[in-house]
Image: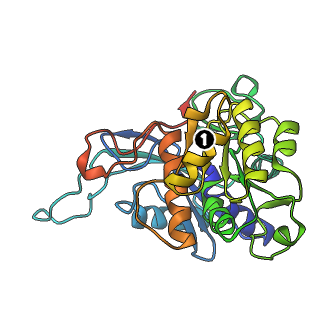
Amino acid sequence: MLGEVWPFVDAHHRCGRPVVLARLVGRDGPGSRPPGATMAVAADGTWRGSLSGGCVEGTILDLARRVLDGAGPHLTSVTPGEHLLPWEETPACTGELRVLMTPAPADPVHSAITAALADGRPLAVRVGLEPPYAWSVASGTGQLQGNGAGFTEELPRRRRLVLVGATDLAAAVAVMAEPLHRSVVVLDPRPRHITSGALPDSAAIVRAWPDEWIGRHRLDARDAVVILSHDPRIDDPAIRAALAADVGYIAVLGSRATHAQRLRRLAGTTGTDRLSGPAGLDLGGVSPAETALSVLAELVAVENGRGGHRLRDGDLPIHTGTTATHA
């Protein structure tokens, strides 16, 4: 997806280095990556992203180099395992991949994508599947410009992850949430907590009573609140505010005994059955990093409607859907 590789694309753009995008626009057969998966290859040979999880990336690098060396944008077909010898076993993902090889879009499209991702605003992005393979952007798919066949991806509003309590665990969660493309806000009314220096620059650190901040900001089912302060004077009002805001995921840290006490204090509050407490999946971890992984793993599972079981013990498709479409 564009959002996964765009920081890499933008960094090279600001340095004046060309970048070629390989975009998966269609596939016949199974595969590990959905339509819209993107691989970005820069003129200096560095690259980010994946179209197949490893099966065709070497071929894509060769194709990208040709475009960087002057070949025009084009659609091509790539088959995992097509270069194997006859006696070598082919990979399970043998479907033909239809890949669009094109230079990364110039301004104003580049600037529009960069701004939308930075601000967390939704944006529809279209690239033509016929010459001249033109790019266009708009606030919605209905406003996109372009004739003929095209491939459209909707960059959604970035999901917000609100962390209540500027703790060491909040710092670990905030760091891990960055590659998950979350807009992280850390709330704490205690001045010495928010100035600890442990929190990453990518997080917005706000000195405020969390319940008051949540009441002033529109949170919805796409957003999450994780309660981490271990101080009932901070945590309990924040929980009530998050429940009133219909937040999609509300996790509360603490042991089962601590959570039982919390539920007694919140008796009569509507929606306490929605609380994920104790927070996280059962990974058995102890360190802040392991606990952060547990909490974020549960968040991803809940958002995708999954139970967080071991993949080997289930039979559902490994991946969920995508927002990329043909038009």
Q: Is residue 176 above or below residue 259?
A: below
88 vs 262, nearest the viewer: 262
Q: Is residue 81 visible?
A: yes
Q: Seen in the image, is 161 located left or right of residue 48?
A: right
x and y percent of residue 94 in the render?
26, 49
Which residue is labeled 1 in the image?
Answer: 263
Secondary element at tag 1? helix
269 vs 76, nearest the viewer: 269
Could you tell me which residue is drawn at 23 percent across and 52 percent down? 92
Could you tell me which residue is drawn at 45 percent across and 68 percent down? 285
Could you tell me which residue is drawn at 77 percent across and 33 percent down? 138
x and y percent of residue 324 in the render?
55, 36
Q: Is residue 296 visible?
A: no
Q: For residue 54, what is the image quadrant?
A: bottom left
x and y percent of residue 200 in the render?
74, 70
Could you tell me which residue is drawn at 74 percent across and 30 percent down? 244
Its colouring scheme is rainbow
Amino acid residing under circle 1? Leu
